[in-house]
Amino acid sequence: MACTTTGATTTSHAYDSADRLVDSGYTYDAFGRTTAAPGTTLAYYTNDLVRQQTAGTQRQTWNLDSQLRFRGSTVESNASGTWTQPSPSSTTTAPTRTPRAGQWRTPPPARSPVT
């Protein structure tokens, strides 16, 4: 089946010398990382991994482990000017890799300190 031009629309975009989209609503930091796109803002860790993304009244924050790898995330909502977690399950923990087996597993629960 051939494509037709009936009802088709054309969308144009603008780019800077680094080939980054510079349409309205897009901003970048000094390192060339996207800090805002229409309806979304982004923040980064110093190792360039995304730390936080906010879109409207929703925000997700990613956590890193001691090796600076993604470890989990927290999702929050802002309905009345204060960020709150909608439920206890809004915090996730990333799976860890078992080197010997090469399979993904969920980390064991935290242990109580020995007294």
Image (cartoon, rainbow, N blue to C red):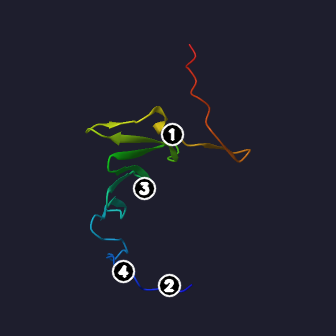
Name the residue tied to disc 1. 92
**Quadrant of image for the N terminus:** bottom right
Q: Of marks 4 and 3, which one's residue comes earlier in the chain?
A: 4
Q: Nearer the viewer, mark 4 or mark 2?
A: 2
Choose the circle earlier in sequence order: 3 or 2: 2
| Real-space CA distance between mark 4 and mark 2, rounded to the nearest whole angstrom | 14 Å
Label ID, residue 3 = 2
Residue 94 position, x and y percent, is 55, 43
Q: Secondary structure at mark 2?
A: loop
Cβ–Cβ below 8 Å for labels 3 and 1? no
Q: Mark 3: which secondary structure?
A: loop
Q: Tag on residue 48?
A: 3
Which residue is denoted by mark 4 in the rendering?
10
| Viewer-side label of 4, 1 | 4
Reply above or below: 91 against 51: above
Q: Position of residue 84 (x, y in %)?
A: 35, 36
Is there a contact, CB below 8 Å, between mark 3 and mark 2?
Answer: no
> In this rendering, which labeled residue sits more in front, label 3 or label 1?
1
Q: CA distance from mark 3 to mark 2?
A: 42 Å
Task: State the residue lying farthest toward the top.
Answer: 115
Q: Residue at x 28, y 64 (%)?
A: 25
